[in-house]
Structures are given as C-alpha cells and as structure tokens.
C-alpha cells in the first residue's frame, strides 16, 4: 500500500543500496558463467578470492594472509558460523540495542543467552564502556559490535574501539565486529577492529571481522561475505561449510 503512494519513499527496513551493481562486476559474472566456473571450490572459498580479500586488508595497513580469510554465503552465515563455533549452550553473548535483530536470533539458535547493551541517542548511539564492563560475567564469551551501526549509522571512533577491545581482552571475551557497512561512511573515518589487534600474536587473536560485498558494491543478491580471523578459527569455521 505504501509503495502506491504518489510521493517517493525512503525505505529503511532493508539494507539495499540505491545504486546498481557496477557494470564491470556484472560482466565478470557473466564471463565466469560462460567459462563454466560453476564447480565446487574449497570450503573456505576460492583461493583467488581469499587472496583478493587479504590484499584489501593489507592495503589498509592491516597485515592479512589468505589463511585468515573464510568466504561465506553472505555475512550472516559468517555471524552464524562464528556463534556455532565459539558458543556453547548457556554461554552469554553481548549485542547492541538498538541493533540488527538477527544477532539475538543467532544467539537463540545456538541456545546461548543474548545480553543487550544500550546505545543511546544521547551518546550518538554508541555504547558506554563502563556499562559493558558491568554486563560481562563468568558466562560471557562473545561481544558483537556493529561498526558502522545498523540501523543507527553510528561510527565508532578509534578511542572507543581501543577501550572496548582492551576491556574484552582483559576479560577474555571474543569480539565479533560486523563491518558490512564500512564502505558507506561519509562524514567520519571508519576504523577496522582488526587494525587494533596484536599482529605479533595473530594466531591467537580473539577478534573476528565480518564483512562482504553486499552493501559497498550493491551485490546483495550475490550472497558473498567473509570473516577475517585467526587461522585456527578459519579451519574450524571451514568445517561448517
């Protein structure tokens, strides 16, 4: 009914970019299909794509190898696979409120307890580290952050991100940073959580970055996402694909 109204509507309930998939991507897709590139690939994704994604992070000054990348059918599978791998029934996972509703649903699917942390309008929809510290208990295993925020658009400043990651490191809480909207930032600078991890101990990093091509390249129907995390976790995640 709303779509039949005469005025133009701005739809905020679906994260669909307002531009088309770039022509060179469409052309490359057609060429790949014509060249019969439709067979099985490694569980973690094609070697070429994993290399391209790792190069993308390296170009931002974030040392990354293909062994730290797993490609998924959309970033939501990345989120679900991380929950399946990291959480046990009864564990607690912190997630933002307001936030993407699927975070809570994923927690329910793996039978863990979803604990929301508030992101108030008065704080620019950013969390307070002091409040998160109080929410962390003996059963807290993961914290999900969304940067930039969905649906708020809030972008974490570097100092806040540093404080959050330091707190989680001290309390042995794994951080899952959903950065699917990182290419759509206009009035501030996006800081990738992976840029703040201890590169000297990347094999044991407890930071996973989730992203993909859906938003930045208007490829929502392609269902291509990825997780950047430590190589040992990539091996475990690959078993779910």
Image: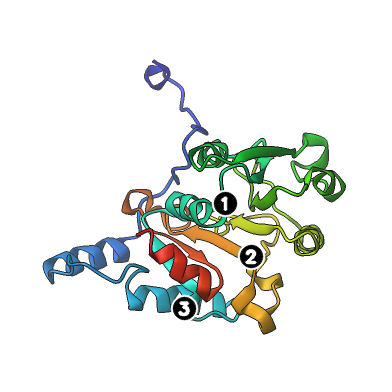
Do labels 3 and 2 touch, CB within 8 Å?
Answer: no
User: Where is residue 134 drawn, in percent x and y?
Assistant: 84, 44
Between label 3 and label 1, give the one nearer the viewer.
Answer: 1
Q: Is residue 25 left or right of residue 227?
A: left
Which is in the foreground here, disc 2 or disc 1?
1
Identify the residue position indicated by label 1 in the image. Answer: 87
Image x and y of residue 41, in percent: 26, 70
How far apart are the two marked residues, 2 and 1, measured between alpha carbons?
15 Å
Question: From this viewpoint, which residue is outermost toward the right?
Answer: 130
Helix, strand or loop at mark 3: helix
Quadrant location, the N terminus: top left
Q: Is residue 47 left or right of residue 103?
A: left
Answer few, some or many: residues within 10 Å of disc 2's Cα (few below 14, many 20 plus, some between 14 and 19).
many
Disc number placed over residue 218 in the picture, else none: none
* Residue 207: assigned label: 2
* Quadrant where the C terminus is found in the figure: bottom left
Q: Residue furthest bottom?
A: 200
């Amino acid at each position: 009914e709303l779509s039949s109204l005469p005025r133009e509507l701005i739809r905020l309930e679906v994260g669909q970019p307002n531009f088309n998939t770039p022509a060179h991507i469409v052309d490359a897709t057609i060429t790949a299909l014509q060249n019969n590139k439709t067979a099985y690939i490694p569980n973690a994704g094609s070697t070429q794509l994993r290399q391209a994604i790792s190069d993308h992070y390296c170009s931002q000054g974030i040392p990354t190898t293909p062994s730290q990348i797993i490609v998924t059918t959309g970033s939501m599978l990345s989120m679900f696979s991380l929950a399946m791998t990291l959480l046990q029934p009864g564990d607690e996972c912190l997630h933002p409120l307001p936030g993407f509703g699927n975070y809570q649903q994923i927690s329910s699917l793996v039978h863990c307890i979803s604990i929301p942390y508030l992101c108030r309008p008065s704080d620019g929809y950013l969390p307070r580290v002091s409040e998160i510290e109080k929410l962390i208990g003996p059963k807290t295993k993961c914290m999900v952050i969304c940067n930039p925020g969905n649906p708020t658009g809030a972008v974490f400043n570097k100092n806040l991100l540093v404080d959050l990651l330091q707190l989680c490191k001290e309390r042995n809480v794994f951080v899952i940073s959903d950065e699917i909207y990182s290419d759509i930032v206009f009035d501030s600078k996006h800081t990738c959580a992976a840029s703040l991890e201890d590169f000297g101990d990347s094999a044991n990093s407890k930071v996973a970055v989730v992203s993909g091509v859906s938003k930045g390249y208007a490829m929502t129907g392609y269902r291509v996402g990825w997780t950047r995390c430590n190589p040992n976790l990539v091996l475990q995640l690959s078993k779910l694909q």
